Amino acid sequence: MQYYSLNNNASNVAFSEAVIKGLAPDRGLYFPENITPLPKSFFENIENMDTAEIAYQAIHQFVGDEIPEVELRDILKDVLSFDFPVVEIEDNIGTLELFHGPTMAFKDVGARFMARCLGYFNRNNEDQVTVLVATSGDTGGAVANGFLGVKGVNVVILYPSGKVSDIQEKQLTTLGQNITALEVDGVFDDCQEMVKTAFLDTSITDHKQLTSANSINVARWLPQLFYFLFAYKQIKHKKKDLVFSVPSGNFGNICAGIVAHKLGLPVKHFVASTNINDTVVRYLQTSKYDPKPSKATISNAMDVGNPSNFIRIQQLFNNNFEALKSKFTAYSFTDEQTKKAMELIHDQSGYVSDPHGAVGYLGLKEQKLENNDYGIFLETAHPVKFLDIVEDTLDTTVKIPSQIQRVMDREKRSIKIKNYENLKEFLLR
Ligand SMILES: *Cc1c(COP(=O)(O)O)cnc(C)c1O
C-alpha cells in the first residue's frame, strides 16, 4: 500500500515510511492510495471472529507486505488484549467502552499499535527515532505507556501546563526511561504547532529522525477503525441501522470510523460530537473552514481549535460538501449541557459517564434517532480520568482502578518550556 500526501507535493511512500516520517515533507497528512472494501463474507461471519482476527482482516491492506502476516497477527493480539464492550444504557442506545486498556483511554490501541510497528521497523537499526507528540490530555499517557522501553525510540511529549487532569499529568510525567514530558506554557494548539514546526525544521531533522505519534500518524490513526467493527459485531443481531456518535477533538477517531464504513461496514450516520470548540460544526453550517484558538473545557481531550484530521474526512468524501453532509453531522455542546447529560445518564441508568462520553450521548440525542436506529456513543475515557468533575457533578465516588493508583503514587517529572526555541534546544542538546 502506498500513501500520498494530502498536500499533493511530496512523493508517495510505503506504510513504513509513512509511520517513520509521520507527516509528509510538504506538511501534508498521509492518506492511503486505495481503500478496498472487505468481502461480504467478512461481515456475514464477523460474530465468529475474535478481535485480533477482525483487526487483521481490516488492517492488512493498509500495512501491505511490510510486516509479515505472522508478526502482524502477533502485534494485533498483543495490542488488543482487553475488552471493547457495548453497554446498553437505554432502549436502542449503547455506549462502546474504549477505556479498558492500560491507561484507560481509547488512544491505547493506536499508541500500542504504532509503538509495535515502529519497534518492528527499527529492529535492526542502530539509529534512534524521536517520537514527538503534542497532547491535550490522553494521548500523552497512552503514548508514554505504549512506547515505554521500546528499543531505539525516544519519546518527547508536549502538554499544556495546568490544562490536563491530575491523573493525565501523572500518566505522562512519571514513567521515566525513554519518555520525557515537556510542560508548555500555553494551550494545546501551541503544543501542536511547535510539533509541526519541528518536523519541518531542517536544523533539527538533519540531526534527528523525528516522527509523530499524534493521530496524524497513520499507525496511530488507522487502527481506531477496529472499534466500529467490534461494535458492529456485538449489535448486528439486533438488525438495526447503526448511528455512531463520536466525541471528537482532532477528528481522528471518527475519521477512522468512516474508513471502516468505506471497508463496507453498514453505518447509517456519523455524528461528530464536540464541546464548544466548534470549528467543524460552523464549517458544516457555513461551508467556510475558519479555525479558532482552542478554549478550555471539562472535556479537555477535545479542546482542539483546528482539528488535523478533518482534511482526511473531506478526502474520504472526495471533497464533496453535500456528500459529506448527507452522512455526517456535527454538534457542539457547552460544559453546562455536558454536566446535565452526565446527571441524566446517571439518574436514568446508574451509568457513570466521563465528560467526553456525555458529549457523545448528547450528540445522539440531538440527532434524533428513528424507529429502526441503534445509537452508539463512544465512551473514550474511564470516568476516573476526570475524577473531580465526575465526582462533583454526580455526587458520587469513583473507585480508582489499580493501574491508575500505581501512577498516582509516583513523582511527577517534567521540563518547563515557553516557546519553540526551548523545544529546539531540548531536542538538540
Ligand atoms: C483524544 C480524545 C478524544 C478525541 O479524539 P479525536 O480522535 O482526537 O477526535 C475524545 N475523548 C478522549 C477521552 C480523548 O482522549
Image (spheres, rainbow, N blue to C red):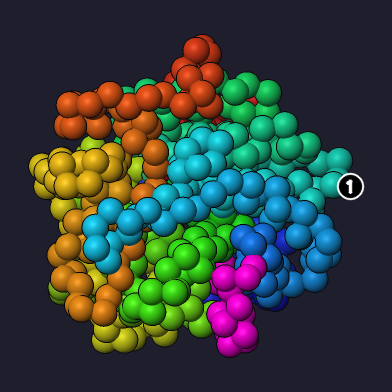
Q: Left of 281 or right of it: where is 354?
A: right
Q: Residues within 10 Å of mark 1 (few under 14, many from 20)?
A: few
Please report the residue visible at 56 percent of the width from the left and 36 percent of the height from the top.
Answer: 102
Residue placed under numbered mark 1 in the picture: 124
In the rendered image of this protein, does residue 289 appear above or below residue 73?
below
In the rendered image of this protein, does residue 149 appear above or below residue 83?
above
Q: Nearer the viewer, residue 102 or 96?
A: 96
In the rendered image of this protein, does residue 15 appear above or below residue 85?
below
In the rendered image of this protein, does residue 259 appear above or below residue 354?
below
Q: Nearer the viewer, residue 244 or 49?
A: 49
| Residue 331 in the image, given as x and y percentages of width and height | 19, 62
| Residue 417 in the image, given as x and y percentages of width and height | 44, 25
User: Does residue 190 appear anywhere in the picture?
Assistant: no
In the rendered structure, which segment of residues is drawn in magenta? 29-49
Quarter-of-image position of residue 152? top right
Q: Left of 315 or right of it: where is 123?
A: right
Q: Nearer the viewer, residue 330 or 414?
A: 330
| Residue 244 in the image, given as x and y percentages of width and height | 34, 67
User: Does residue 320 appear anywhere in the picture?
Assistant: yes
Please report the residue visible at 27 percent of the width from the left and 66 percent of the height from the top.
Answer: 92
- Quadrant for the N terminus in the image: bottom right
Please report the residue visible at 30 percent of the width from the left and 49 percent of the height from the top.
Answer: 357
Q: Secondary structure at mark 1?
A: loop
**Amino acid carrying mark 1 in the image:** Asn
Q: How many marks?
A: 1
Please report the residue visible at 27 percent of the width from the left and 43 percent of the height from the top.
Answer: 351
Residue 256 covered by magenta stretch: no
